[in-house]
Amino acid sequence: MGAWRHIRRMDELRELSHALRIRRRECGLTQQALADAAGIPRRTYQRLEGGHPGARVDALILALRALGLSIGLVPRRRPTLDELGTIYGNEDESKPAAR
């Protein structure tokens, strides 16, 4: 089970690093320009974008801010229909109309 957890974590790191790279390119920034804007060394940013498992969380937060992004916590499971109704304010629409 430990190996499976490690593989999932690496997949998540790859996904995050890919998202960083895409956003940086969308913003038209080089790695150096992004690192400068975030106030971190270029090598530190390269580790983030490379999915290095030892990358610092504070550097990630600074890089995300420089990209106009933030971290949000979301549940790993998909929300139920009732939860979606509550989230989007449609909870009354999912119930049959009273006559």
Image (spheres, helix red, strand yellow):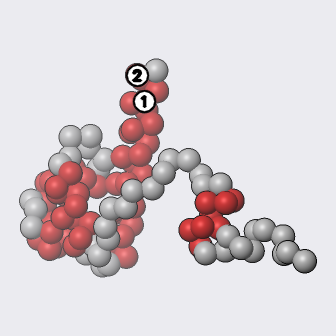
**Left or right: residue 93 compared with residue 8:** right
**Residue 28 appears in which quarter of the rendering?**
bottom left
Vertical position of residue 5 compared to residue 40: above or below: above
Residue of label 1? 5
| Label 2: which secondary element | helix
**Left or right: residue 27 compared with residue 98:** left
Q: Residue at x 31, y 47 (%)?
A: 51
**Left or right: residue 39 compared with residue 8:** left
Residue 54 image position (x, y, % from top left): 21, 40
Q: Residue furthest top?
A: 1
Mark 2 and mark 1 residues within 8 Å of each other at the beta carbon: yes
Residue of label 2? 2
- Tell me which amino acid carries mark 2: Gly
Q: Residue at x 78, y 68 (%)?
A: 95
- Tell me which amino acid carries mark 1: Arg
Q: Residue at x 37, y 76 (%)?
A: 26
Residue 66 image position (x, y, % from top left): 22, 73
